[in-house]
Amino acid sequence: MKLALFLYVTLCVLNLYVNCKWTAREAANEIPTRKPYKYGSNPPPHTELIAMARYTLHNADWASIATVSTLPAIEGFPFTNVKSIADGDIKNSTGIPYFYMSPLDFTDKDLSKNNRATVLVSLEETRYCESQQWDPEDPRCTRLMLSGIMKKVKEGTPEYTFAKGALFERHPAMADFPPDHDWFVAKLKIAQIAMVDYFGGAKYIPVKDYLAYNYTQIANTPRSQLSLISVKI
């Protein structure tokens, strides 16, 4: 009788330990809820095309990059990869996507043969679409597609210092990337901007107007004062 009681208590303790252990593991592996809208506000109205385009890029942490593959089995095929991005530091948006890249990666191998690329970011990355119960493919969940030529940023220049600082601010883990991977900073020289941000098909935004838009000033200005700012759209 004593042996049976001892075994029963032991099993109960073990079961409690296992349950606690798995509960701790589940808590540790739980996907954290990302704080949406870095500026604490909703995206601009879909009718403000340039503002929406700049908002979507600046609030994205990663992008899908499409290149022309150099892999032997699919040479010449479209090929996509995910890369971390920043278009400037949190307080200074440029509208230009910057990347921290290595020659060992699929993307740079492709770009070394053909430097044309298309970069795609989605408003879904901010979790705004999720909060509205929109599917990522819903036209109201903005998709921004920037096509152009990928170029290395010359090391030691002010642009290089700015871009690398912005990337490391947004992605602190980059500071610990393997130093023997020959990392460099690259940017997309934009040739075309296409965006789906509402029903009715894609819209095309003039590159010149997109780059001239002072998104940082708008994002940091109270709504009550926006009417006082003259913005070229």
Image: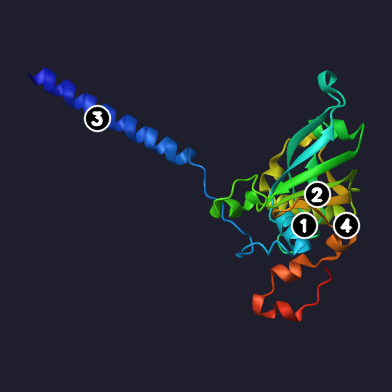
* Mark 3 / mark 1, whichever is N-terminal: 3
Residue in the picture at 80% in, 37% down: 66
Q: Secondary structure at mark 2?
A: strand
| Residue at image mark 1 | 88
CB atoms at circles 2 and 1 under 8 Å apart?
A: yes
Residue, disc 2: 98
CA separation in Å, label 2 and label 3: 54 Å
Structural crowding at the residue carrying mark 3, measured as other residues with C-alpha within 10 Å and reported as few (<14), some (14–19) or many (≥20): few
Q: Quadrant of the C terminus?
A: bottom right
Provide the residue designation for mark 3: 13
In the displayed structure, does residue 33 sit left or right of residue 200?
Answer: left
Q: Position of residue 41 (x, y in %)?
A: 61, 65
Q: Does any portion of residue 108 appear in the rendered image?
A: yes
Task: Report, in whole angstroms, how far the alpha carbon at label 4 lies from the one at label 2.
Answer: 16 Å
Q: Residue at x 37, y 33 (%)?
A: 21
Q: Is residue 204 left or right of residue 225?
A: right
* Mark 3 or mark 4: whose residue is earlier in sequence: 3
Amino acid residing under circle 4: Val
